[in-house]
Amino acid sequence: MLLLAPVGSAVSSQAEESSSVILAQSAIPEGTSMGRSHAGASGHKGSGQPQVISQGQQRVNEEEITKLYAHNIDGTEAVTLYVRNIPVLTFLGVEDDGSPLERGRSLAAKIDRLYRDGVDANGIGVQWKDETQDYMVEVNGEPLVVVDAETRLADTTNKVAEDALQVTNRLRRLLGKAPPLAVIANQPEPEPPEPTATNDVKPAEPEVVEPQPDRVRYTQNGWASWYGPGFHGNRSASGEIFNQYAMTAAHRTLPFGTWVRVTNLDNGLSTMVRINDRGPFTGGRIIDLSIGAAEAIGMVSSGVAPVRVEILDP
């Protein structure tokens, strides 16, 4: 497990006390902090560029696939767990629940052990626990981690159920490329909406205006991420149904229906997408692509990529 912390982190002294923790320079993009969301949540600013807080051991154990990144979210101590360089869970500082670092180390050790033992990722699941009123990620029926307001998806959706499903699907993919789950076991049925005069009205289809590819209004540079499993079939912020295979994206401010050309600066691949959702609200990221768009520019496996976003005239 790699433990990374920003300048001035209060956890550095704790990290140096543990000889089993391997410390190294972070590979996290400069300015990136984990706090929101793929699609529609409040954002948080991180505490700056990570730094080495101890040299520790000089080699990384090849049987360890986890890293811990210590940072702050709106002044609250936080630790984000990475698996194979993909952010999975963020632990927040809360009273009487152990420090984020302790909780992160405990889960990282469990995940590394599962990896060494060759766990079948198809056995990773999630269910709602009526007795404790929370969402439990499990491995072959054994508890792994509870997902709640203090232990949440790294790029949280601000919806605990969606966070729990996405955490589960990331672990299934990263520990064995198991296919994603579509539902949470024992998920309680939502309360039916109050009947209204508009309930039976079918929403209008979104008007799609073709872009002018050669007319670039302005350009943004930054980091892109992608989303899909756990959101497919849900209603996006624009009101249309999200299709993870369509060429669409989430942006914080661009009007819905705006077309942009996104170029992956790592490989030069480009695609055009239509803005139909809000997000991401994570520092350092400027656009959140559907998985279909992410595949078109070759960034699914990396999770994030540096991009140029060209806003096009209609």
Image: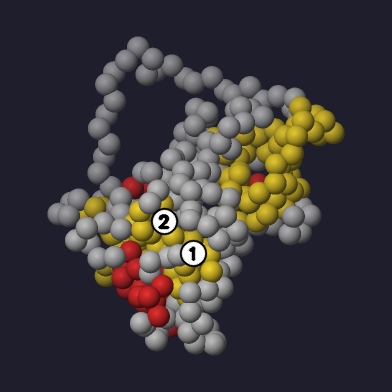
The CA span between labels 1 and 2 is 9 Å
Q: Is residue 271 above or below residue 254?
A: below
- Is residue 147 among the parts visible in the rendering? no
Question: Residue 190's x, y, as percent?
Answer: 27, 36
**What is the quadrant of the N terminus in the image?**
bottom left
The amino acid type, in three-letter code, at marker 2 is Asn
Q: Residues within 10 Å of mark 1 (few under 14, many from 20)?
A: many
**What is the quadrant of the C terminus in the image?**
top right
Query: Among all residues in the image, which is located at the extreme front?
Result: 8
Please give left or right for residue 186 compared with residue 247 in the image.
Answer: left
Please give left or right for residue 224 compared with residue 129 in the image.
Answer: right
Do the CB atoms of the residues marked 1 and 2 lie less than 8 Å apart? yes
Q: Is residue 144 above or below residue 166?
A: below
Q: Residue, x 85% and y 33% (percent of image)?
A: 214
The amino acid type, in three-letter code, at marker 1 is Pro
- Identify the residue position indicated by label 2 in the image: 72
- Identify the residue position indicated by label 1 in the image: 6
Query: Residue 244 versus residue 294: which sits nearer the camera?
Result: 294
Query: Residue 232 versus residue 257: which sits nearer the camera?
Result: 257
- Label 1: element kind: strand
Question: Residue 200's x, y, as percent?
Answer: 39, 17
Q: Residue, x 49% and y 65% (percent of image)?
A: 7
Query: Residue 214 versus residue 221: which sits nearer the camera?
Result: 221
Please give left or right for residue 255 compared with residue 200 in the image.
Answer: right
Question: Residue 43's x, y, as percent?
Answer: 46, 43
